[in-house]
Image (cartoon, rainbow, N blue to C red):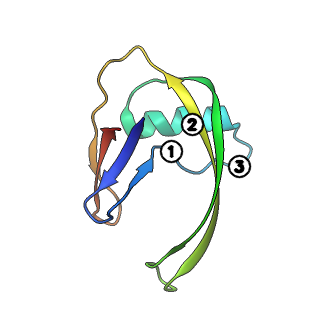
Amino acid sequence: MLMVKNNRDPYYYSVGGRVKLQEILEDAIIRKCFEETKVHFEVDRLVFIHENFFPVQSGPFGETQFHEISFFYLMKSNEVEVKCERYTNNGIKERLEWG
């Protein structure tokens, strides 16, 4: 499983992001995986759906409550190695790790 870790938070999170308006889920995950890894992946199949409620402590309004519905896919690629280290807009260093 390919996960993201940063130098601020004590947990891992999945590669991915928000779906654009009128974007198909499979197109969104292919786009987000390429944006974050620069690797071309293909969708194999949907593996599971996860619903999550959580607070985020930072932001201009203090704590904000989130309701997230995530779709996790099994992906395929012919490329062997995936490496990525980058900085977010907030200056947080992220890296990809296999788990």
Q: Which residue, as the protein is rendered here, is positioned at the far bottom?
A: 61
For disc 3, the neighbor class at 10 Å (few under 14, some 14 to 19, many from 20) is few
Residue lying at 31% horizontally and 29% vertically, measured from the top left: 82
Type of amino acid at the residue the image marks with label 2: Ile
Please state the horizontal and vertical placement of residue 48, each as a whole percent of the image: 64, 39
Q: Which mark is residue 81?
A: none
Label 1 with label 2: CB-CB less than 8 Å: yes
Type of amino acid at the residue the image marks with label 1: Gly
Say which label, 3 or 1, has the lower sequence index: 1
Mark in the foreground, 3 or 1: 1
Asked whether 12 or 63 is in front, the reply is: 12
Please state the horizontal and vertical placement of residue 90, each as a whole percent of the image: 33, 66
- The alpha-carbon separation of the residues under discs 1 and 2 comes to 6 Å
Q: Which mark is residue 21?
A: 3
Q: Write down the residue under mark 1.
A: 16
Q: Write down the residue under mark 2.
A: 29
Please tell me whether mark 3 sits on a helix, a strand or a loop: loop
